Image: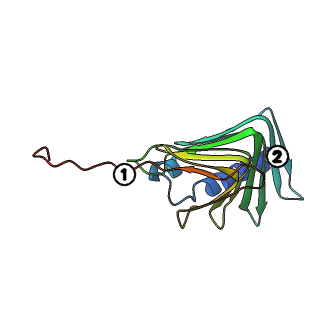
Amino acid sequence: MSLCQRAFAVLAIIIAAALSVTASALPDDAGKPIHIRGDNAEFDQNNGLLIYTGAVRIDQGTLRVTADRMVVEYRDDQVVKITAEGTPASYQQQLEADEGLVNADAKTIVYHTTSEKVDLIGEAFLTQEGNEFQGSVIRYNIRQGRVDAESKSDAPVRMMLQPAPVERSVNGG
């Protein structure tokens, strides 16, 4: 195995560890194989970067990220940030078995692995089970389950929240 092949093998393991740290995701996702593909890949060992370009896609269980360009930054054999750029870049994942998919689109999606935060930047849109957030920037804190949205243009932040389902009694009342 050449030095380059070994480097890519090590990087694949690092990426697998980074993508499986999302505590909120389905437990099965972390144990699934990670499939990464793109038209081109570049490994910059000196700067701690792995760069994929051209129809980039990552799949692991219910997780899917697609982008035109993806940059994986790592330090000390740990992935610290994954940046996906596209027209748009997209993310989807089922976080809980009894809930629908979370879908997100933005020009740039940044996943901060150590703080477990996701930034959606530029025409950001986040939806799950009919609930929607839209703005210039959406910040999602996975640990806290918190979503912050802001507008950097004339368009306002938009939210649409679905009502809770009405519980009906067995007696029809």
Q: Secondary structure at mark 1?
A: loop
Q: Tag 2: residue type? A: Ile
* Residue 2 in view (yes/no): no
Provide the residue designation for mark 2.
51
Question: Which is closer to the viewer, label 2 or label 1?
Answer: 1
Left or right: 165 as drawn, with respect to 87: left
Judge whether 112 appears above or below 44 on screen: below
Front residue of 113/89: it is 89
Left or right: 21 as drawn, with respect to 41: left
* Residue 164 in view (yes/no): yes
Q: Tag 1: residue type? A: Ala
Residue drawn at x 56%, y 61% as measured from the top left: 142
What's the CA distance linking mark 2 and mark 1?
43 Å
Provide the residue designation for mark 1.
164
Position of residue 47 measured from the top left corner of the image (x, y, whole percent) = 88, 59
Residue drawn at x 46%, y 51% as measured from the top left: 26
